[in-house]
């Protein structure tokens, strides 16, 4: 579940020991979790995505949390790990691949294989800024080439996926290899101090309101 939004584990997705209780355990090739779209998942003016990840490897990266289906012009946003361990946060204003979008990649590679890392990304349309964090500390993440100013975030009707994304052909891609735990979505941009507090809480849980 993500808040009151219940998901379904697909294609043999299992469970492992997490930071708080059990974590989703993904095989990196087929598994994912699907959460149907719901009004409580809408984040059109500001957003935060955060959670704990422990990839088995960072050879090919993998998606953490996405509401993104380019095959049906339902691109909302996506947060994932790139090959080598950098992080990328992508958002769209219009939903189609050719519409206004913005993305940022971290300059460093804060994610390592076999190690738990708390990761977070925020965007606020009022400032048009993306911020990315690893283990409670902001990581430099310049906007990528072709990024444009977003007046709002597209309210996608695609399901939210943990551990995968739907590509332009409608197929699942970007399967995450390893464990994902305590993943949350907020319809506001959390402050740096709030994200640091979530990381510091660790196994005690978030203790923060407003997430789904």
Image (cartoon, helix red, strand yellow):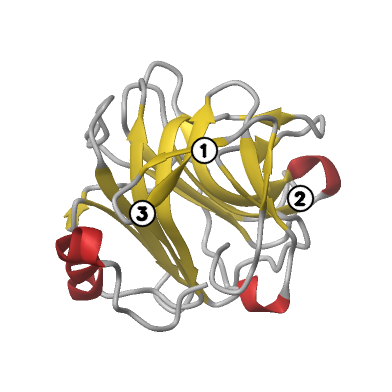
Q: CA distance from mark 2 to mark 3?
A: 38 Å
Q: Residue at x 36, y 20 (%)?
A: 57
Judging by the rendered image, the residue that carries numbered circle 3 is 21
The quadrant in which the N terminus is found is bottom right
* 188 versus 180 height, above or below: below
Judging by the rendered image, the residue that carries numbered circle 2 is 96
Residue at the far top: name it. 59
Position of 167 with respect to 141 (left or right) is right
Q: Earlier in the sequence, mark 3 or mark 1?
A: 3
The answer to which of 99 and 154 lies nearer the viewer is 154
| Circle 3: element type | loop
Q: Hey, which quadrant is residue 153 in on the image?
A: bottom right
Q: Residue at x 44, y 78 (%)?
A: 188
Q: Residue at x 59, y 34 (%)?
A: 13
Judging by the rendered image, the residue that carries numbered circle 1 is 63
Between circles 2 and 1, the one closer to the viewer is 1
Specify few, some or many for label 2: CA neighbours under 10 Å numbering under 14, 14-19, or 20 or more. many
Between circles 3 and 1, the one closer to the viewer is 3
Q: CA distance from mark 3 to mark 1?
A: 22 Å
Q: Which mark is residue 115?
A: none
Q: Residue at x 52, y 53 (%)?
A: 102
Specify few, some or many for label 1: CA neighbours under 10 Å numbering under 14, 14-19, or 20 or more. many
Q: Position of residue 12 (x, y in %)?
A: 65, 30
* 38 versus 109 height, above or below: below
Q: Is residue 42 visible?
A: no
* 111 versus 157 height, above or below: above
Q: Earlier in the sequence, mark 2 or mark 3?
A: 3
Q: CA distance from mark 2 to mark 1?
A: 19 Å
Position of 68 with respect to 185 (left or right) is right
Between circles 2 and 3, the one closer to the viewer is 3
């Amino acid at each position: 579940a993500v808040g009151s939004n219940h998901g379904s584990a697909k294609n043999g997705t299992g469970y492992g020991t997490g930071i708080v209780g059990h974590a989703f355990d993904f095989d990196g090739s087929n598994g994912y979790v699907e959460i149907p779209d719901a009004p409580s998942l809408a984040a059109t003016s500001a957003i935060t995505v955060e959670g704990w990840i422990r990839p088995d490897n960072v050879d090919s990266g993998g998606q953490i949390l996405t509401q993104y289906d380019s095959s049906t012009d339902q691109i909302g946003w996506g947060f994932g790990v790139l090959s080598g361990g950098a992080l990328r946060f992508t958002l769209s204003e219009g939903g189609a691949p050719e519409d206004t979008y913005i993305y940022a990649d971290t300059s460093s590679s804060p994610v390592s294989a076999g190690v738990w890392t708390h990761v977070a990304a925020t965007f606020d349309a009022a400032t048009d800024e993306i911020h990315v964090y690893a283990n409670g500390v902001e990581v430099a993440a310049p906007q990528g080439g072709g990024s444009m100013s977003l007046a709002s975030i597209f309210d996608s009707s695609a399901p939210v996926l943990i551990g995968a994304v739907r590509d332009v052909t409608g197929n699942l891609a970007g399967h995450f290899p390893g464990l994902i735990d305590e993943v949350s979505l907020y319809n506001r941009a959390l402050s740096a101090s709030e994200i640091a507090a979530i990381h510091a809480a660790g196994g005690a849980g978030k203790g923060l309101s407003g997430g789904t």
